[in-house]
Image: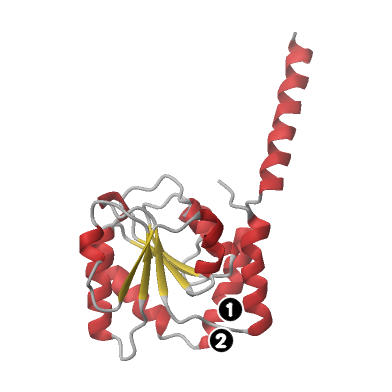
């Protein structure tokens, strides 16, 4: 459930130090139906029609729906991203898009918020319950609803740079709920409780 928080958080602190902003959206995941790739492309095309200065969308991954992404104006199909390269790639965007129709958790959401990135996710993404607050560090849209996704993209990109930076800072704060150390501490605590109950009842 937790990314290598320390590694991804380095990007957050670099953003904070330079106050830099990469004005682009990013998608990271398998190019497959359950990831909502068709919805993503549909929503992005609508976004480009309505935005006065549309941002590009960088897509990292591979899969059976790759043909939907390739050749679309404004979309860069970047291919599979090696895990070690992901922090750097996330640093070159300011908002993660994940319109999945089925997603029990989605580690990439934790990776994104740890870098201080805003996120727009569907309500089918399990991680949204803990890592996304609508209007605070991103937006939650209805799964399968391209129109809602378009509106969220327009809303986010039309914010002032200061407002987007604040959202990114909020994301980093949300990310602190889950770290490898915290998960390890929880596991050890629960194991000790179980052991104590076993000996008490045995």
Residue 142: x %, y % from top left? 31, 60
Instruction: Relative to 78, say whether 186 is above or below.
Output: above
Query: Where is mark 2, residue-wise?
Result: 162
Residue 107: x %, y % from top left? 50, 51
Is 10 left or right of 44, judged from the image as shown?
Answer: right
Query: Where is mark 1, residue-wise?
Result: 166
Is 58 left or right of 127, judged from the image as shown?
Answer: left
For disc 2, the neighbor class at 10 Å (few under 14, some 14 to 19, many from 20) is few
Residue lying at 75% horizontally and 8% vertically, measured from the top left: 202
Residue lying at 30% horizontally and 55% vertically, measured from the top left: 31
The reply to whether discs 1 and 2 touch (Cβ–Cβ < 8 Å) is: yes
Q: What secondary structure is marked by label 2?
A: helix
Along the line of sight, the residue nearer the viewer: 201 or 174? 174
Query: From mark 1 to mark 2, how far is it between C-alphas?
Result: 6 Å
Residue lying at 55% horizontally and 75% vertically, measured from the top left: 167
Q: What secondary structure is marked by label 1?
A: helix
């Amino acid at each position: 459930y937790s990314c290598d928080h320390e590694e991804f958080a380095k990007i957050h602190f670099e953003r904070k130090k330079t106050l830099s902003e990469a004005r682009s959206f990013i998608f990271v995941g398998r190019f497959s139906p359950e990831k909502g790739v068709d919805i993503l492309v549909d929503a992005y095309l609508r976004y480009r029609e309505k935005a006065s200065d549309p941002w590009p969308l960088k897509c990292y991954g591979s899969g059976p729906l790759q043909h939907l992404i390739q050749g679309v104006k404004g979309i860069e199909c970047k291919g599979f991203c090696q895990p070690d390269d992901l922090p750097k790639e996330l640093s070159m965007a300011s908002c993660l898009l994940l319109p999945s129709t089925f997603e029990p958790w989605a580690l990439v959401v934790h990776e994104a918020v740890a870098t201080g990135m805003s996120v727009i996710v569907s309500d089918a993404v399990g991680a949204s319950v803990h890592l996304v607050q609508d209007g605070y560090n991103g937006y939650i849209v209805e799964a399968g609803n391209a129109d809602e996704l378009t509106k969220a993209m327009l809303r986010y990109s039309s914010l002032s740079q200061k407002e987007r930076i604040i959202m990114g800072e909020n994301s980093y704060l949300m990310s602190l709920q889950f770290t490898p150390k915290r998960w390890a501490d929880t596991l050890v605590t629960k194991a000790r409780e179980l052991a104590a109950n076993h000996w008490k009842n045995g």
